[in-house]
Amino acid sequence: MRFILDATEVDAAVDDSLFAAAERAGLHIPTSCAKQGRCRECLVEVEAGAEYLSEPSPEESHLQGNFRLACRAHLVRDGEVRCHTLRRNALRIEEAFADDAASRAVDPIVERVGKAAVRDGEVIETHAERILGLAVDLGTTTVVVALFDLESGVRLATQAFENPQRFGGSDVIARIHFDTTHPGRLLQRTLLGYLQRAINALPCANHDIFEMTVAANTTMRDLLFGLDVQSVGQMPYQSLTEQQLQRGEVETTSLSMPAKTLRLPLHPRAMVYGLPLIGSHVGADAAACLLATGMGDREAVSVLMDVGTNTEVIIGNRERLVAASCPAGPAFEGGGLSCGVPGLDGAIEHLTIDEHGQTTYQVIGGGDPIGICGSGLIDLLSKLRRTGRMNAQGRLTDGEGSFAVGPHGMRLTEFDINELGQAKGANTAGLLVALKRFGIDVREVRTFYLAGGFATHVDVDAAQMLGLLPSLPASAFVKVGNASLQGAAMALRSGADRQRLEDHVRRIEHLRLETDPEFFDYFVDGCQFKALPGGLDPLLGFRTSRRIEQTPSVAALTRALGSPARRPLPETMHETIDEALTLYEQHGQAWVWSRAVEIERIDNQSFVAGGQRFHSELLASRYTSADAHAVIAMAVSAGHWVDGETEARWADRPDLAVVLDRLAAAVVQETMQAMTIDLCRTAEAHELCLLPPYSPGYTGWAMDDQHRLARLLRDDESGPSASDLEVLDSGMVRPKNAQLALFALSRGPTNDQMRAFHPCQSCDLRGCRFRQDGYVSSAP
């Protein structure tokens, strides 16, 4: 029996699994499920001899062509079998920021003094040809080594390779177990061997490299430096360096070791600096991202989130920083799912579902799919929700229990969805508890940094709709890619940046989420596939109070004047219109206020929202039919200036007075419509149904409710004052050209309920959720 794996011949016998034969020969195939067929990481491609292998197992039913799981494929008769393991697509090096040395101070730990290389005042080389350094991002999956000129700060070269420790498991828990149960530090020795080869391949003399910085998670860093990692894998999940810090034996969790101790081919006096750990599983990679983003130096509060098997969250600014980690499991990396695979060639990374349930997908590397990776899973779940094929609890609405993702029986099951829901729940709970402990509402976050490979490729809108990310404006999200490498580079090139990082880490409050009494409640709620609270579902707490620049178009003003569409205006009228537009641009000031509140009660003739009872049998019926859960009160005003100017112009320029009055009406009309369309687009993106605005005084709603609507807005601290917007006893408003209106929001009416409505055709939004007549308003 001949078995050849990755060009290496392996002794094998009939009944051996490919995994067992390879393991016996010392060839390492990754796994994190103890060869149970669940993690799908031992995927191999059979080049020849498939007929000598056992029939595909149930765990391999979704695989097509020549792909097999090494732990499930057995040799059944004599012959020759050739196969190879797959390389992960994560070898793509994600760059986040321009590597601009001019934007960074270059003051490295090792500097040139004359011809000598000096560290901390000590000459370590009398005749240094060049002074170079290495920044290393040591990831669980991928290792990136960047070579820098420490005198100019310029990056000279980069090497990347797959972390060879994968044979010990794909996640840190598996590698901790492997290192603990296998004496001889095999994981460390294997990694150092690969690092030696990568360093030797760089375009420089090894003795010119005087410094090396390493950013990594807690386990990867400590394995590299040869520390015992058993304590990281058991309560309270702390590195030995963190325990030493707590006992007062050291001043930092960073590590510094001579390169020769690690047998790295650098200058004999070179040092290796391991960036400090924040706490527990919030490692030096998160600290490096913190340094790279600069969030710890700014006044505005930012969030940094690295979604993965162990998600890390940092929240804060220059005044305060908190950090937490939450074990989310491997589901979003394809682990443990019937059709899931890591982000390697052949994985579906993006997909769409048409109205007939047919999928169109994008495959990494092209070709036929072998499974679906994390970003593709987010796309799939969001499309299932958007098309109504899956409810918020993760149940498929057609009763089938699974959904066809791709060819050859590739399906996503409700069991898979449950696994993904629990992974999402852990992420959600971690973020919300950290926000609560920091004492900030998610709407106050100005920048939300997404770090790591998964975040680089995930669709933010899809992740928001599922509740994996909060409902912030798209502009708030910044994908920083491999910010860990950038942070390691900054700590290499600048002693000041290194010290700044040490200072940040010392003041970070490490949160232990499992001790929070609300963590489990957040987790249970987070397992559902719905937008996070505080965003648009429910859109409670949403508010607007701002001056806007809204000058109507000539066409809108012409309509407001009541001019027939096909009859041109006289030239003198055009001159008056231009004059009115100029005056309003110079002096006018339009305002808009809005506030979203929950609908507290609906009966046959009225509804209560924000403590105000509104009397409209028509709206009560419509809101009941649409299952509305919230309303958005809005007021738009063209401003007081136009009222005063119109009255003043009646004496000498009645033509201008009329045009100014109609211009103000057009401002209100266009502003209300623009706000309506904007809200509609935003609600649509989050799978909410927005019903069009309705105003008191229109058929079916008494003018008396103008007072209650104004009161609802004024009850909010950012609402209009009585001088901004006045409602007279008659129900009329001042300024004269102002309007109050009410929208309603629903989390998703059924198709039967929606048949009562029809599109408004007021914008080009695909799948518009307006289901009533178009824009409606009361007379001014």
Image (spheres, helix red, strand yellow):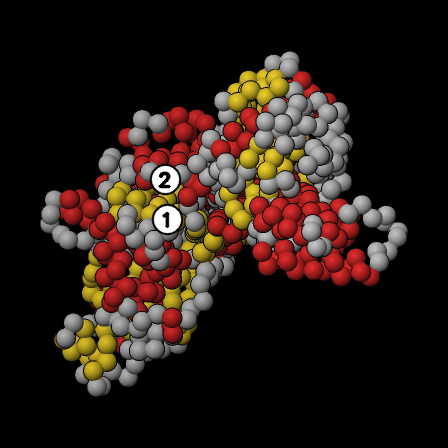
- Number of numbered labels in the structure image: 2
Residue 517 is drawn in which quadrant? top left
Disc number at residue 440? Answer: 2
Crowding at dot 2, Cα within 10 Å, few <14 / some 14-19 / many 20+, comes out as: some
Residue 626, percent from left and from top = 66, 24
Disc number at residue 247? Answer: none
Residue 91, percent from left and from top = 48, 58
Residue 44, percent from left and from top = 53, 48
Q: Is residue 608 left or right of residue 569?
A: left
Q: Are marks 2 and 1 in contact (CB under 8 Å)?
A: yes
Disc 1: which residue: 301
* Foreground pick, 687 / 334: 687
Residue at position x 39%, y 42% in the image: 311
* Foreground pick, 252 / 725: 725
Residue at position x 72%, y 37% in the image: 775
Vertical arrangement, residue 403 with respect to residue 498, above or below: above
Mark earlier in primary sequence (2, 1):
1
* Foreground pick, 459 / 646: 646
The kind of residue tagged 2 is: Ile
